[in-house]
Amino acid sequence: QVQLVESGGGLVQAGGSLRLSCAASGRTSSSNGMGWFRQAPGAEREFVAAISWSGASTSYADSVKGRFTISRDNSKNTVYLQMNSLKPEDTAIYYCARARTIVVATARNQYDYWGQGTQVTVSS
């Protein structure tokens, strides 16, 4: 089993920044890509960003490209999402997830473990 715990969410004004963290514990010995998804009220959970095991490859949703940056520290079993220039439409619950593969994964069904989520609210 793998446990993923997100932190760093909160309330921020439009134009502000937040950094989310996702700490993994349990059976973390395998090499896996990681990703961030988000779900706004009444909407489907959508892909935000993903990173390969090595950190050499990343992928972003068009809506966050140039504003968000995903990174990881494998020595700490932690993945980060730096979010800059936040907009009200970024308001959602943000989920961290572990991919089944070592490479970048952008589809929900490519992920097998999910965190509980952290709320991000951006006020206008």
Image (spheres, rainbow, N blue to C red):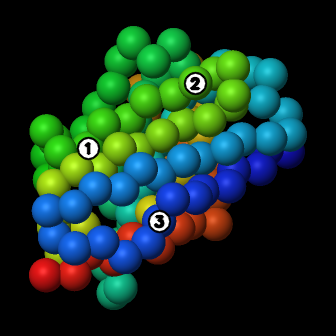
- Seen in the picture, residue 14 relative to 65 is either above or below; the reply is below
State the SS at label 2: strand
* Residue 107 seen in the figure: no
* Residue 62 seen in the figure: yes
Could you classify mark 3 by the number of other residues whose Cα lies within 10 Å: few (under 14), some (14-19), or many (20 or more)?
A: some
Answer whether labels 3 and 2 touch (C-beta < 8 Å).
no
**Where, quadrant-wise, is the C terminus in this rendering?**
bottom left
Residue holding disc 3:
9
Mark 3 or mark 2, earlier in chain: 3
Q: Amino acid at mark 2?
A: Asp
Could you classify mark 2 by the number of other residues whose Cα lies within 10 Å: few (under 14), some (14-19), or many (20 or more)?
A: few
Mark 1 or mark 2, earlier in chain: 1
Mark 1 or mark 3, earlier in chain: 3
Cα distance in 3D space between marks 1 and 2: 17 Å
Q: Position of residue 25 (x, y in %)?
A: 80, 41
Seen from the viewer's position, the closer of residues 111 and 59 is: 59
Residue holding disc 2:
73
Q: Position of residue 40 (x, y in %)?
A: 34, 77
Q: Position of residue 31 (x, y in %)?
A: 66, 19
Determine the residue positioned at 15% across, 55% down.
85
Could you classify mark 1 by the number of other residues whose Cα lies within 10 Å: few (under 14), some (14-19), or many (20 or more)?
A: many
